[in-house]
Image (cartoon, rainbow, N blue to C red):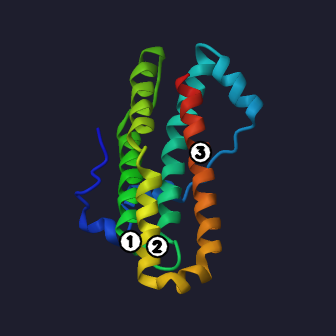
Amino acid sequence: MKCAWLALSPRAFGSLSHRTEEFARRTATAFPLEELYRLGQGVGEERLHLARLIHQEVAIRNAQLCKELLLLPFGLAQTRGVHEVVQCFSSYVDWLAEFPVPANDADEQPFAELLREILKDNNNIPSTLGRAVWEVRTAMGEAGYEDVRSEVNLILDRFFIKRIGLRFLIQHYIE
C-alpha cells in the first residue's frame, strides 16, 4: 500500500470523495493524555477499546486535514503539491474505512501493521507541501509572497501541529 504520488485522479483537483467528506464532517475526539496512557497500558478489552477509537480517529483526522488543505488561501489549494498530499491522506481514509474495526485480540496485529504503513508512507509530506509553497511564491513573486508569508507560515504551522498529533496517536497505539 503506497500513496500514488504521481498518478493523481481527476477528482483530486477539485473535491474530496464522498467517503472522505463524510469522515471530515465528524467530530474528532479529544484525548486527555491520562486516558491515552491508561488505555495504552491496558490489555484485553481496554487495548481493544483503544484500537477501535484509533481506527475511527485516524480516518476522521486524515479526512479533516484533507478538507483543510483544500481550503488553503493564496492559491495553495490549487497547487499540485497540496493535491498530492490530499490524495495521500484520502487514501488513508479509504484504507481505514475498508479495514475491519478490530473485534478481538487477533485483529490487533493486522491493524497495527496498517498503522505502521500509514506512518511509514507519508514521510514526504513536508517536502511536498514545501513544493506547493514554492509554486505559490513563484507565481506571486518575492514581493507579493512577502506580504502573505507570515499568514502562510501560521497556516502551515497549525497543519503540521495537527499532523504531529495524529502521528502521535498512531505511534502511541503501535508501541
- Residue at (26, 61) in percent of width and height: 8
Disc 3 packing (10 Å; few <14; some 14–19; many ≥20):
few
Q: Residue at label 2?
A: 76
Q: Which residue was labeled with disc 3?
A: 164
Coordinates of residue 105 in the picture (x, y in percent): 48, 15
Q: CA distance from mark 2 to mark 3?
A: 21 Å
Query: Residue at label 1?
Result: 79
Residue 3 at x, y percent in the picture: 31, 47
Q: Is residue 57 above or below residue 138?
A: above
Answer with left or right where residue 107 lies relative to residue 26.
left
Kindly identify the residue that appears in the image at 33 percent across and 70 percent down. 13
Q: Name the residue at 35% across, 72% down.
A: 14
The three-letter amino acid code for the residue at tag 1 is Thr
Is there a contact, CB below 8 Å, between mark 2 and mark 3? no
In this orientation, which residue lies closer to the viewer: 138 or 103?
Answer: 138
- Gap between marks 2 and 1, in whole Å? 5 Å
**Circle 2 — which element?**
helix
Identify which residue is drawn at 47% across, 53% down.
Answer: 126
Ranked by sequence position, the earlier of labels 2 and 3 is 2
Q: Secondary structure at mark 3?
A: helix
Measure the alpha-carbon separation of dots 3 and 1: 23 Å
Q: Name the N-terminal-most of marks 3 and 1.
A: 1
Question: Do the residues bearing badges 2 and 1 touch, measured as CB atoms within 8 Å?
Answer: yes
Type of the residue with mark 3: Ile
Against 10, residue 100 (above or below) is: above
